[in-house]
Image: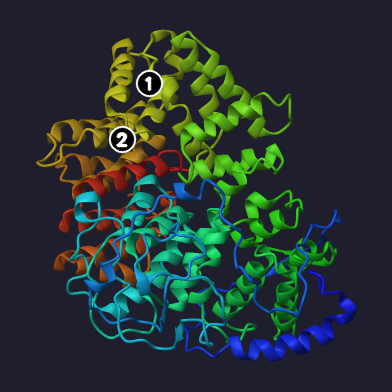
Amino acid sequence: MSGGVSRTTSFVAFSLASTLMAVSLVPFSGQKAWAQDEPPQSEASVISPVAASSVEKTGGPVRLLPRRLTPKRGPDAASLDVGLDSDLSSKVDAPLDADVVEMGENTLASPTAILGPPVGADRFKLLSAPPGGDGSGIQVGVLGRVDEASVGLLSHLDGGLGSTMWLGTDRALVEEGLSALHVPIEGRSLQELTKRFLLSTATAPGGVTQGRSLLALRLEKLNAAGLSDQVRRLVRHAGLKRIAPETSVQIARAFLANGDKMDACRFLSALPAGGDVAGDPVAAFTMKMTAYCQMIGGDGVAANLTLDLAREKGLDAPLFFALMAKAIDGITLPAKTPERLSVFDLMLYDEARQTVPTDVVSRVELAGLPALARNIRHPLAIQLAAGERAAGYELISGAELGDLYLTASAAGENEGAGFARARAYRDIMNEAVPQKRSRLVSGLVGSVPDGLVRRALVDVVQPALATAPPARAVLEDAPQIIRVLIEQGDRVRSGMWLNMVRETGAAAPGLVQLELMHLILTLPDNGLVVPEKASQLLLSATREGGFDRDFAAVCAVLFDPLGIALDGAVWPAIFDTGNPANGAMPNEDVMQRLAAAGNAGKRGETVLWSLLALGEKPLAEVHPQAVAAVATALRQVGLRDEAKAMVLDVMLAKTSTVGS
């Protein structure tokens, strides 16, 4: 039989698949949905015809599973960054919060380790037989207790929150909070705190569980924040021997996001067989991965049988079926483009040699942005838009975005704001005169409003500003340059530019706001700031009126939890000139739990409620009193620098919106 199954024989093929899959799809008591795997669908689009992809021809009887699940690894396979502590999972003994699959004897096709060096019976193996079937070497079911919740990448020496961060915290509360956590959170400091929070190595909290895997919840949030590379690093480092189904899904997603499709398929045998593919996202993902891995393993027959079975079981995934049909048989099927696209969808577009939608950057999940930016098969406009967005979330570096800008600037006079910024960046890098370079930087960054693109530009222009000394010749651009330097966290250079402006006596717009933000950069790590400086700035801003006065009202609230003592005349001056600062207050229950956790010194819980409190609204809209409460709680658990950085992010967000 050929590698592709014709439509006319699909019924016969399906009958065979149903019989065979009844063996392999053993019901498994896995966890319920963590998120809907297939997003809602929007406008219709039809996949355009292309030349059919070549499929390996196979002879003999139909095989549901391929002879070799994944293609042979290339010569660069050995360069994978392997680093695993094979003894980690044996050192902990906390309750497992979900059913697990234990991997059997090592039957890897090559000695190259994907998750670490061979460790005998503890190695992951390729799927040479149905999970739980004879010869698979895999036991399917509940297998005792193992602590997967405690693993992480960051110890307290590496920036983690400490091994005792959950001391005294109830496990069910952590599961509830993690499930509700919205990522990514606006603000560089909060994004960094979120990453450290999710990657910290810590003893798992005790108490009754609601049945969710804590590791799966953490990996889900890391993937949602676009940090799939961190998930991959964590898995390789941890050396997990028994994995909950929810965790396996998140791990496979992370490997797909990084283009490691062969490695992702090695987790197929860790996914639960069976289940309701129409209602259980874990079961749906397992079915999709089974067909996908069969396809890239060169067994189109098995992949088509699995697809037929998936249809019969009610899997609602038109785009998935269409792309798989194109990749396997070259058949074009109509399909609606979902409102949200996953990294799995991006992989299938590549396999099918199909053009992604023109608005893919606004549709794809964050984890897919780096792949879009780096894939030269996509139009340059898509690469550029994805690169700016990815750099705004710090998923790629400013240097990488700079290289993309230079590539785009050499592609001719393309239309679009992204290409205009690319040409402006090229002009900055080609300018040898420091003063002119500073003016070009000011013009580029000032051309975009606050948001992801601006944050990306702040990073990409850092080398250009680092060699541009303050100069009166660019006095008009000084406020914009100072703002950029403050966003970069450069307190020395921003202070130099501020001194230059003060010495000229020029009336620079927003200068007092810049000085108030620079004050936060210069706060000592311990002890109080001399109150005269802060009080003088606030009184000066109050006298200026307008936006300066409104910004002073915000700062007066935020300074106290940072240990900045104010003169007694500040508050009367603020009240005499207008209303106090306002904004949206977070959920009252969250704020109460935040205060209780801070007072009790519970570090992990304090960070969790802080992220929940500030993740509900854009930072510019959050009430300063709520921000002050978060800063107070963070300081109570020893996170003084984190509180300071968070306050500065809020000030940066509010400086252009107060009074509006």
Q: Is 607 left or right of 168, judged from the image as shown?
A: right
Task: State yes or no: discs 2 and 1 in contact (Cβ < 8 Å).
Answer: no
Which mark sits nearer the N-terminus, 2 or 1? 1
Residue depicted at x 53% and y 18%: 428
Q: Is 214 left or right of 364, judged from the image as shown?
A: left
Residue depicted at x 51% and y 75%: 269
Residue depicted at x 64% and y 57%: 347
Q: Residue 107, relative to residue 53: is it above or below?
A: below
Q: Nearer the viewer, residue 466 or 591?
A: 466
Identified by mark 1, the residue type is: Ala
Residue hosting label 1 = 466
Of tags 2 and 1, the one toward the viewer is 1
- Judge the density around disc 1: few (<14), some (14-19), many (≥20) Cα neighbours within 10 Å: few
Q: x, y (%) of residue 474?
A: 44, 12
Location of residue 653 (image quadrant): top left
Residue hosting label 2 = 517
Q: Nearer the viewer, residue 300 or 271?
A: 300
Q: x, y (%) of residue 103?
A: 42, 76
Q: Nearer the viewer, residue 480 or 425?
A: 425
Q: x, y (%) of residue 41?
A: 71, 68
